[in-house]
Amino acid sequence: MCGNCFTSEIYEFHTYFDFEEFDKILGQKIEQNYLVSIWDSTNQYSYNDLVKSNVPYADNIYKCNACNETWALSTPENARRGYFLPVDEASDLETELAKRDKKTSRGCIAIIIVIVIILIAAIVN
């Protein structure tokens, strides 16, 4: 991280307005050639797919021309609030979010099973 790219991480965009403000700053840094897009979801540049596979929700990956930090951008959509993080941190965050999603889905399945059992018990009686 450096002054040419960004000096702090964004773990989530709290509102879409926050993302739009960030996107303006990001656009300026790209125009000034501080950051270069090395992968995006619509026009895949020659970038290591292994790195991209570690951040599956990233829409763009940028590299700072000054410090060589590689950044992953995930735009906010629905429940996922997006992020702008160095690729390693983005990978860790996505791993954590995947674990959380699994726990949530297990809880939903358990609730559905309980409801089905209650319905069956009500029908049998």
Image: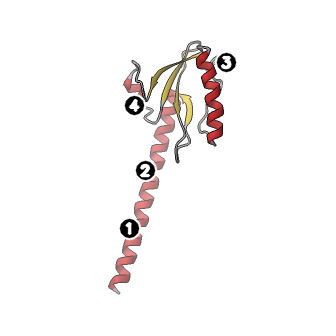
Q: CA distance from mark 1 to mark 3?
A: 53 Å
Instruction: Tell me the number on the disc at residue 102.
Output: 2
Answer few, some or many: residues within 10 Å of disc 2's Cα (few below 14, many 20 plus, some between 14 and 19): few
* Residue type for callout 3: Gly
Depth check: give the residue in front, 21 or 113: 21
Nearest to N terminus: mark 1 or mark 4: 4
Labelled pair 1, 4 in contact (Cβ < 8 Å): no
- Mark identifier at residue 113: 1
Count up the numbered dots. Answer: 4
Q: CA distance from mark 2 to mark 1?
A: 17 Å
**Percent from the top left, x then y, of residue 14?**
63, 42
Residue on which the image places disc 4: 53
Q: Position of residue 76 (x, y in %)?
A: 55, 40
Q: Where residue 92 appears, x then y in whole percent? A: 49, 35
At horizontal 43% and vertical 35% (from top left) the residue drawn is 56
Q: Quadrant of residue 7?
A: top right
Nearer to the camera, 35 or 20: 20
**Looking at the picture, how far across and down is residue 32, in whole percent?**
62, 14
Identify which residue is drawn at 52% across, 22% down.
62
In-front residue for pair 119/107: 119
Q: CA distance from mark 1 to mark 4?
A: 34 Å
Q: Which residue is mark 3?
A: 3
Q: Residues within 10 Å of mark 1 (few under 14, many from 20)?
A: few
Secondary structure under the numbered disc 2 in the rendered image: helix
